[in-house]
Amino acid sequence: MSALQRVNFVTILLLLLIAGTLVLASLVYDFRQRIVPLIIGIPTVLLLVFLLLGTFFPRLGRIAEGAMLGDMSDTESVGGDAGRDGNWLRIIIIAGWLVALSAGLFVFGFFLAIPVFLLLFFKFESKLTLFKAAASTAATALVMYLMFLYFLNIEIWPGMIPEIIDEYLGGGRIPEL
């Protein structure tokens, strides 16, 4: 194991220890109080375990590298200042996706914005075929909605558009301050 791999391993191990501790500590809270730590903590722990295993099994490491956002080959092939400008361009593009998602969530709600965002993101940013993008979108949205609606019993924001489908699409109200 090279020095860089040892540093990577120790860093992942420390992050796994912190995330695992937070997940375990949240179990003493009431159900409603531990929802957010569990929603964030459990996937984080799973991804860190995946990365930790990737340090021992190179094939897993290559899979993780393949899941990076977008195609960075254009910025890596250009040297000097242009390469750094290309990195900033990638950051601006990803920030644009996040702003678009936030606006879509506010206006159209989770039931419409999440599938549309995921489909567009998988198709254009991850460069998946339309079939793979649609399948990934359907699987991700289904798991998310089942988790929030049925497992956690949390109301999902319907969006600010006029009410179209009661409690699912439109009719959201911003709470008064």
Image (cartoon, rainbow, N blue to C red):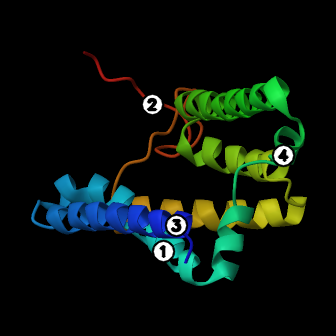
Which disc number belongs to residue 124? Answer: 4
Mark 1 and mark 2 lie on one chain; the one further toward the N terminus is: 1
**Callout 3: SS:** helix
2 vs 46, nearest the viewer:
2
Q: CA distance from mark 1 to mark 4?
A: 30 Å
Disc 1 residue type (three-letter): Leu
117 vs 99, nearest the viewer:
99
Left or right: 169, with 60 as reference point:
left
51 vs 147, nearest the viewer:
51
What residue lies at 80% left-to-right and 60% top-to-bottom?
133
Residue under circle 3?
3
What residue lies at 73% left-to-right and 31% top-to-bottom?
93
Q: Residues within 10 Å of mark 3 (few under 14, many from 20)?
A: few
Q: CA distance from mark 1 to mark 2?
A: 42 Å
Q: CA distance from mark 1 to mark 3?
A: 15 Å
Quarter of the image that includes the C terminus: top left
What residue lies at 55% left-to-right and 83% top-to-bottom?
56
Q: Report x, y in % for residue 160.
A: 52, 26
What residue lies at 61% left-to-right and 63% top-to-bottom?
140
- Disc 1 or disc 4, which is closer to the eye? 1
Q: CA distance from mark 2 to mark 4?
A: 30 Å
Residue under circle 2?
172
Q: Are marks 2 and 3 in contact (CB under 8 Å)?
A: no
**Callout 4: SS:** helix
Q: Are marks 1 and 4 in contact (CB under 8 Å)?
A: no
160 vs 14, nearest the viewer:
14
Q: Report x, y in % for residue 74.
A: 88, 41
